[in-house]
Image (cartoon, grey):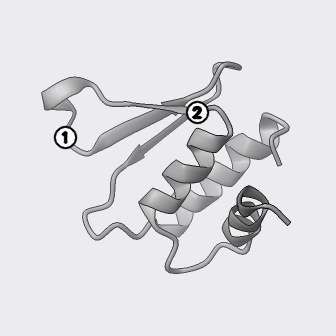
Amino acid sequence: MSRLEKEIERLKSEPKDYTYYEAKSILNSLGFIEYTKGKTSGSRIRFINGQNKKIDMHKPHDNILKAYQINEILRVLKEGGLL
């Protein structure tokens, strides 16, 4: 099992301690690019891939993603056929 496959399995288990950087690593590996709107964006982040799939979220201050953020990532990845 590759590193990416292990990370995806961890994401699918919807852990309570899933970090923003773990999500960013998976999304980058799957072809998503992180965008911010410059200095005025605050903590708003958007990930976009070549299929024009978008994931919008706020970067958490404590680095731990909320359950709804994990569910949104999983939903977009499933819709895009990446899971």
Quarter-of-image position of residue 49? top right
Q: Name the residue under label 2.
A: 32
Task: Decide: is 23 above or below 16.
Answer: above
Residue at (31, 30) in percent of width and height:
36
| Upstream in sequence: badge 2 or badge 1 | 2
The image shows a total of numbered marks equal to: 2
10 Å crowding of disc 1: few (<14), some (14-19), many (20+): few
Amino acid carrying mark 2 in the image: Phe
Residue lying at the far left of the rendered structure: 39
Vertical placement of 73 versus 45: above or below?
below
Distance, label 2 to label 1, CA atoms, is 20 Å
Q: In this view, does 17 lie above or below 53?
A: below
Q: Residue drawn at (73%, 61%), measured in percent from left and top?
A: 8
Q: Residue at the location (37% across, 39% down)?
A: 45
Badge 2 crowding class, 10 Å Cα cut-off, few under 14, some 14 to 19, many 20 or more, is many
Which residue is farthest bottom?
A: 16
Furthest-front residue in this view = 2
Q: Which amino acid does label 1 sit on?
A: Gly
Q: Where is residue 23 in the image (x, y as percent from the top left)?
A: 54, 55
| Secondary structure at numbered mark 2 | loop
Residue 28, position as x, y percentages in the image = 57, 40
Disc 1 secondary structure class: loop
Picture disc at residue 42: 1
Q: Quadrant of residue 7?
A: bottom right
Q: Nearer the viewer, residue 31 or 42?
A: 31
Image position of 34 with respect to 25: above or below: above
